[in-house]
Amino acid sequence: MSGQDASNRATELRRILNEASDLYYNEGAPPMSDAEFDALFQELRTLEDAHPALRSPDSPTQRIGAPLPRGSRFETAAHLAPMLSIESLTSASEVRDFAARAVRHLGLDEGTELPWAAEPKLDGVSASLLYEDGVLVRGLSRGDGAQGEDITQNLRAIRSVPLRLRGEPGALPSRIEVRGEVILSATNFARLRDESETTTDTPFRNARNTVAGTLKLLDPTTVSRRRLDFVCWGIGHAEGLATRSYAELRERLQGFGFKLSRPFASCSSIEEVITYHDGLEADRDALPYEMDGIVAKVDDTELQRRLGRTARTPRWCLAFKFAPRRGTSRIERIVAQVGRTGAVTPVAELEPVELAGVTVRRATLHNWGLLAERDIRVDDVVEVERAGDVIPAVVEVHAARRGPESTPTAPPDNCPTCGSSLEAEGAFLYCVNVECPDQLRGRIIHFASRRALDIEGLGPKAVDQLMEAGLVETLEDVFRLPLRRAELAELDRWGERSVDKLCDAIDGARHPELARLVHALGIRHVGEQTAKDIASAFEDLDALRSADEEALCEVEGIGEEVAKSIRRFFEQPGNLKFLAALHEAGVVPRRAVANEGPLAGRVFCFTGGLSTMSRDEAKLIVERLGAKTSASITKTVTDVVAGAKAGSKLDKARKLGITILDEDGFRALVDAS
Ligand code: IVH
């Protein structure tokens, strides 16, 4: 290929690939299969290897750069326009006053309503991206507002940061600072936390801290793996872009390929802004991102210009915060608690503090290593945080407010519950006695908890009472409780109604969704999100139990360590006995709604690569036709589709005598269905 041809082809490939990943990450609508994408990506990489001069900064091959040397520091650079803060308000009356002040400042009649644009205030870390002629040339952290750290490498590694703005070169702004929030979705945060239980020594305390820590890393590969997101909320300096309102600016930014904060509302009065705030606050646990309030902007660029700014904040933009999930308290005691895995962890007993409507009295201190490292002590004044359904945690210590007599708390020498010896594993201490009553207690509480089997009435207090009365001595005993109504009714403070309610709740939990049951099992490293990932890949518990490490690793979101942990769980005789007991008690996960369609009742397993479509596409096709898919070969699999380089699954399928289709056979079947 001539130099000119190579250059033309490279330009074309870059355009196709950038457009495809933009559609994939920002619109959720991939225009081509993974296999096609990979093939084009490979072609571009080969071209660039042969002609290194073609390697441009907006090439998708350059998204993830090389790690910086250990110990390096980021350079600082000046923002073209300062990054201001916004006025933070906490009550509706403050919001009304803010709006009234703006009306006065504009010299309008009292009571005039301004147009407002309202959107969630995302709780992340802000960043500013500089584009020149449509190409991302630099990314800065906010810093002190005038200067930020050059974290371009890390920002580029975020998939939703466009390396090149979408649009015809002539129609793009010649220079623009695009600003927004780097965030981590609740799902991706949950996944990281599931995995981190014992793998890292610093737990991911909340999504925001994780983002802040991740953007400081020197290795963009890790940044990329953590699946951060960039959501923009405005611009700084801009040349060649004029918009009349924020709503219009949002549309332009979206057109360039950015994600925007949602849900967005155009409000024609400040009361509408307040209603929007209240509605969102009530829903905040259901939203995919952590948000700490809403932002409302006067939705008229000319009015914004006339309103101008004070030293620190614009007069046209306000934040109306939600009730805080973070508050100040004092540690009354530090106690050791034995969890369901036998981990003995420090817990802070606190002066009660109200966090977003919930009174918090206890907070986790994670582990003894971290307790020592962060030097948290009894009597300390601390910041406590509660995010969604996460257990409240101590996130900060006001060490300066500490008295002279304060001393650190040492870890216990023996299990505080059963007195057995403790074993250290990493930063954790474990009680070696599998029959330790607190381990069982922890397992039952977890098993019945809202996000597991959701057995109402079986909270910590009831569990304590049932264990004390000898009604529950093993986890599976829970399902025998409905046979022992008379004994239940004799318990202190239990009336017939509460017995009925508990028994109904237990009976109602006999057919849980597979994901809930997998979560309830309490497999190490398998939290709620990982359990969902697993449930979508396996037909039932049997399929999961017989999946080998390789098959488990193929499930999106499961890495080697998690796969090992799952295998270990199913290899322990005690656990198998427990599963059998559950089965005997009639606990069988609910099947997904029986699908209809020409392939209903069949279960497909794919192995090897297909040439005309990606595996995900193939799965989607058979699912649309009513079939199910399985990540591994099990008794329930009816058809195996073997593409190029099919591996050990094919041998296994042959041994089990399962129908094997090649790609042509598969296509023929699909076309005929
Ligand atoms: S608008 C002139 N909109 O909150 C500044 N900010 O506390 C305009 N933030 O610095 C900012 N979501 O980092 C705006 N939808 C949103 C936001 C948002 C989060 C952050 C941003 C800002 C901080 C102010």
Image (tube, grey):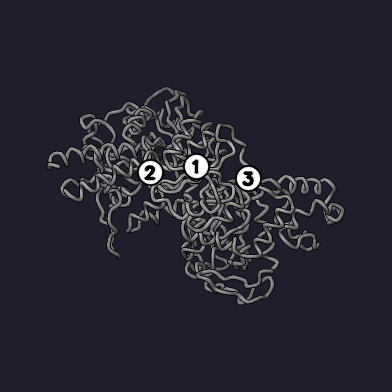
Q: Left or right of 125: which side holds 346?
A: right
> Would you call the spot at circle 2 few (<14 residues within 10 Å), some (14-19), or many (20 or more)?
many
The numbered disc on residue 86 is: none
Please state the horizontal and vertical placement of residue 562, each as a whole percent of the image.
Answer: 50, 58
Location of mark 2 (residue): 230
List x then y, in percent, for residue 313: 37, 41
Judging by the rendered image, the residue that carries numbered circle 3 is 513
Quote the CA–CA distance across marks 2 and 3. Answer: 33 Å
Which of the two residues, 258 or 552, is positioned nearer the viewer here? 552
Tell me residue 181's x, y (percent). 39, 44
- What amino acid is labelled 2 in the image? Phe
Left or right: 436 in relation to 273: right
Q: Which class describes the residues within 10 Å of circle 1: few (<14), some (14-19), or many (20+)?
A: few
Amino acid on which disc 3 is placed: Glu
Check residue 288 in the rendering and tell me which mark sits there, or answer none: 1
* Left or right position of 594 against 490: left
Q: Is mark 3 within 8 Å of ligand 1?
A: no
Picture quarter with the N terminus: top left
3 or 1: tag closer to the N-terminus: 1
275 and 215: which is toward the camera = 215
Of mark 2 and mark 1, the one earlier in the sequence is 2
